[in-house]
Image (spheres, rainbow, N blue to C red):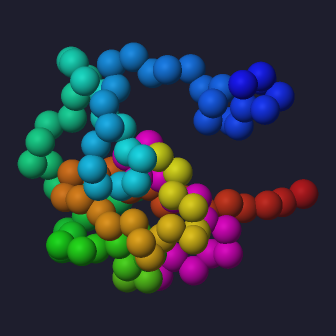
Amino acid sequence: MSDAEAGPADRLPAEKGRQRMSGCRNRTRETGSRQRKEGRQMQLNHREYAGFREGLTVQDVIDENRFTWPKLVVKCSGTVIWPQEYASTVLKEDDDLEIIHLLGGG
Protein backbone atom coordinates (compact mmCIF):
# COMPACT_ATOMS: atom_id res chain seq x y z
CA MET A 1 0.00 0.00 0.00
CA SER A 2 1.44 3.37 -0.99
CA ASP A 3 1.24 6.51 1.18
CA ALA A 4 -1.37 7.89 -1.23
CA GLU A 5 -3.62 4.85 -0.60
CA ALA A 6 -3.04 4.71 3.17
CA GLY A 7 -5.59 6.26 5.48
CA PRO A 8 -4.59 8.51 8.41
CA ALA A 9 -4.52 5.55 10.82
CA ASP A 10 -2.13 3.67 8.52
CA ARG A 11 0.37 6.54 8.68
CA LEU A 12 0.48 6.78 12.48
CA PRO A 13 3.71 5.59 14.10
CA ALA A 14 3.50 2.53 16.32
CA GLU A 15 3.28 3.49 19.97
CA LYS A 16 5.78 1.76 22.24
CA GLY A 17 4.83 0.80 25.77
CA ARG A 18 1.06 0.97 25.17
CA GLN A 19 -1.57 -1.72 25.39
CA ARG A 20 -5.25 -1.73 24.41
CA MET A 21 -7.78 -1.51 27.23
CA SER A 22 -11.52 -2.13 27.52
CA GLY A 23 -13.91 0.67 28.46
CA CYS A 24 -13.86 3.75 26.27
CA ARG A 25 -13.62 2.72 22.66
CA ASN A 26 -10.05 2.49 21.33
CA ARG A 27 -8.63 3.55 24.69
CA THR A 28 -4.99 2.86 25.46
CA ARG A 29 -3.09 2.96 28.72
CA GLU A 30 0.63 3.43 29.18
CA THR A 31 2.52 0.61 30.81
CA GLY A 32 5.45 0.98 33.14
CA SER A 33 6.12 3.73 35.67
CA ARG A 34 3.39 6.05 34.33
CA GLN A 35 0.63 3.42 34.63
CA ARG A 36 -2.56 4.63 36.27
CA LYS A 37 -3.59 3.32 39.69
CA GLU A 38 -6.41 0.75 39.59
CA GLY A 39 -9.62 1.31 41.53
CA ARG A 40 -9.58 5.09 41.13
CA GLN A 41 -12.83 7.05 40.87
CA MET A 42 -13.91 8.24 37.41
CA GLN A 43 -12.72 11.74 36.60
CA LEU A 44 -14.71 14.45 34.77
CA ASN A 45 -12.60 17.42 33.71
CA HIS A 46 -9.85 16.49 36.21
CA ARG A 47 -12.21 16.17 39.20
CA GLU A 48 -13.72 13.06 40.76
CA TYR A 49 -17.17 12.35 39.35
CA ALA A 50 -19.52 11.14 42.08
CA GLY A 51 -22.33 10.25 39.66
CA PHE A 52 -20.64 7.13 38.28
CA ARG A 53 -22.78 3.99 37.94
CA GLU A 54 -22.64 0.83 35.86
CA GLY A 55 -23.75 1.41 32.27
CA LEU A 56 -23.07 5.18 32.39
CA THR A 57 -22.51 6.58 28.89
CA VAL A 58 -20.88 9.78 27.66
CA GLN A 59 -24.34 11.04 26.63
CA ASP A 60 -25.62 10.46 30.20
CA VAL A 61 -22.80 12.59 31.62
CA ILE A 62 -23.47 15.37 29.08
CA ASP A 63 -27.20 15.37 29.91
CA GLU A 64 -26.80 15.11 33.70
CA ASN A 65 -24.31 18.00 33.78
CA ARG A 66 -26.36 20.10 31.35
CA PHE A 67 -23.56 20.59 28.83
CA THR A 68 -25.69 22.36 26.21
CA TRP A 69 -23.05 24.16 24.17
CA PRO A 70 -23.37 23.51 20.44
CA LYS A 71 -19.75 22.43 19.91
CA LEU A 72 -18.27 19.97 22.41
CA VAL A 73 -14.99 18.08 22.31
CA VAL A 74 -15.04 14.86 24.34
CA LYS A 75 -11.99 12.79 25.23
CA CYS A 76 -12.09 9.60 27.24
CA SER A 77 -8.73 8.56 28.67
CA GLY A 78 -6.98 10.41 25.86
CA THR A 79 -9.17 9.13 23.00
CA VAL A 80 -11.50 11.49 21.13
CA ILE A 81 -15.14 10.39 21.22
CA TRP A 82 -17.21 11.58 18.26
CA PRO A 83 -20.80 12.86 18.77
CA GLN A 84 -22.35 9.85 17.04
CA GLU A 85 -20.60 7.63 19.64
CA TYR A 86 -21.75 9.49 22.81
CA ALA A 87 -24.75 7.23 23.50
CA SER A 88 -22.88 4.00 22.79
CA THR A 89 -19.67 4.73 24.72
CA VAL A 90 -19.99 3.10 28.13
CA LEU A 91 -17.66 4.49 30.78
CA LYS A 92 -15.60 2.53 33.29
CA GLU A 93 -14.94 3.51 36.88
CA ASP A 94 -11.31 4.49 36.25
CA ASP A 95 -11.88 6.53 33.06
CA ASP A 96 -10.71 10.12 32.64
CA LEU A 97 -13.45 11.99 30.79
CA GLU A 98 -12.82 15.49 29.46
CA ILE A 99 -15.67 17.55 28.01
CA ILE A 100 -14.80 21.00 26.75
CA HIS A 101 -16.72 23.46 24.63
CA LEU A 102 -15.37 25.48 21.74
CA LEU A 103 -15.80 29.22 21.54
CA GLY A 104 -15.39 31.44 18.56
CA GLY A 105 -14.67 35.09 18.48
CA GLY A 106 -13.33 37.72 16.32
Q: Is residue 69 magenta?
A: yes
**Nearer to the camera, 97 or 16:** 16
Quarter location, residue 41: bottom left
Quarter location, residue 32: top left
Percent position of residue 12, x then y:
60, 26
Q: Is residue 86 left or right of residue 55?
A: right
Percent position of residue 25, x then y:
40, 54
Q: Is residue 90 left or right of residue 3?
A: left
The residue furthest right is: 106
Seen in the picture, residue 101 relative to 11 is either above or below; the reply is below
The quarter of the rendered structure image containing the N terminus is: top right
Residue 12 appears in view: yes
Q: Dominant secondary structure of the magenta stretch?
A: loop
Seen in the picture, residue 20 relative to 48 is either above or below; the reply is above
Q: Is residue 71 left or right of residue 5?
A: left
Instruction: Please state the extent of the stretch shown in magenta in the rendering.
Output: 66-78
**Nearer to the camera, 96 or 101:** 96
Quarter location, residue 50: bottom left
